[in-house]
Amino acid sequence: MLRHLLLAATAMTLVAACARKEKKSEAEPPKEEKAAAASESQVDAAAPASNVIRPPKDPYPSTYSPYASGVTLITGATILTGAGERINNGSLLIENGKIRAIGAGNTVTAPEGATRINAAGKWVTPGIIDIHSHLGVYPSPSTESTSDGNEATAPVTAQVWAEHSVWPQDPGFTRALAGGVTSMQILPGSANLVGGRSVILKNVPGRTVQEMKFPGAPYGLKMACGENPKRVYGEKGGPSTRMANFAGYRQAWIDAAAYKKKWETYWEEAEKYYGEATAAADETKKKSRRSAKSADAKKDQKPPEPPERNLKLETLAGALAGDITVNMHCYRGDEMAFVLDMAKEFGYKVAAFHHGVEAYKVADLLAKNGVCGALWADWWGFKLEAYDSVRENIALVDAQPNGCAIVHSDSAIGIQRLNQEAAKAMADGNRMGLKIPEERAIKWLTLNPAKAMRIDKDVGTLEVGKMADVVVWSGNPFSVYALAEKVYIDGALMYDRSDPKRSPRTDFELGQLTNGFTGGSGQ
């Protein structure tokens, strides 16, 4: 059979060749037209825009697909929308993975067959978003073989990407889910001046990191100030001082700016070349004889050569272009002020200062520059640059006009109780007379990190049309006694404290002698 097919295909090819030959002999075009046609063919082959080389922005794209969900109506709850609103006796409708309606009392209705949850006495919030996590890159169990967060081989390692280290089986993901965390940014560590790219994940079980990647979320860049880089590299050739830290940042930005300029020049020249090639081909078609010489001249021009790719400079250039958000690990207020000046010098924006124990000292500068403080409630004193802390740090950053305070974890344990960390910061602010209500404080865990991570169009608030990332709490989430009872991600019930079947385990945990999980009944 295969032989017959091959014979038939060969016969068809011969017939087509004969037909082309016959057609040519019937009407042989003049030499000028032949030359024009040849030039036209060459130009057309070069003309497609795909010939303009552009490195892919995300060669490892998200393959995330929401888990199956139905229609759910939650009624009778105290709802904190994350947008500054509190709704008493509120109702929330989830449909097709989105928030379809929200309101007070009986203003929200559901179609027949919807799952109805009476949440009287309970509270509902958007899913918690942790802007600073190392889950997956420093997973549990913590061993040398799984320690993949710091590429401590050079001060600037912008070429490394956290997602290539993330272990999806880290049991820490499920513990964070039980604490109401629905999205998180996974960052490299802070050993380096520039540690590499971060990745934003949805907190769902996945075989691969791509199955967890938040669709459409931008990449981040991790940088670090102060003691860490000088401690790690002080005996490895430097930097060994803060002034060398800044010299290292500035040289990296200078190199990145030059690299960015090379590519922009290439794109401009390539688009001009291929655009002119297309125009020449069109002109040739219209006036073949007169344009033959022009097309021949175009034929002798060579397309521009693209620069050689450099993964380190590619990431830094992306930050300069605004495609990649800059996350700066920095403790001291004076260093934050220097970084803000450096950002102006090179034309990029810092999304957030992380840890920022002295953020309260420069809270007005952060607000003026539209920079968030991603902070702890009360971590301090574990090194000298973390010494000058005040418990009111988060509240003072938040209190500024246009202030942006975020509560972050930086801890596989702390991420499980971020609601309690925010509660401590709120209580400290209230004690100093700032009068912070729950509907404002919840933004520290939801809207503000979403803004800094540039995913606020999808998550961070309970608004119609957004992803239905929702937490039902047993009580006021700013109480030490409150527990996340149900956690929805894109409308799918991913965690239910009363149902062990909705307490996911990772592959790593299956078959262990104890289930080792805090969720589910009887645990």
Image: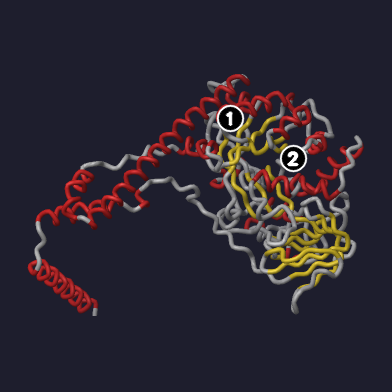
* Location of residue 170 with respect to 472 vertically, above or below: above
Q: Residue 113, located in which quarter of the rendered image?
A: bottom right
SS at mark 1? loop
Image quarter of residue 498: bottom right
User: Which residue appears farthest toward the left when viewing the image?
Assistant: 25
* Coordinates of residue 410 in the picture (x, y in percent): 70, 41
Report the front residue among 272 and 88: 272
x, y (%) of residue 208?
56, 56
Of badges 1 and 2, the one in the foreground is 2
Q: Residue at x 82, y 53 (%)?
A: 85
Q: Quadrant of the C terminus?
A: bottom right
Side of 20 where 2 appears, left or right: right
User: Is 427 drawn above or below residue 381 in the view shown?
Assistant: below
Q: Quadrant of residue 151?
A: top right
Alpha-carbon span between mark 1 and mark 2: 24 Å
Residue topped by disc 1: 193
Mark linked to residue 111: none
Q: Amino acid at mark 1?
A: Leu
Q: Quadrant of the N terminus?
A: bottom left
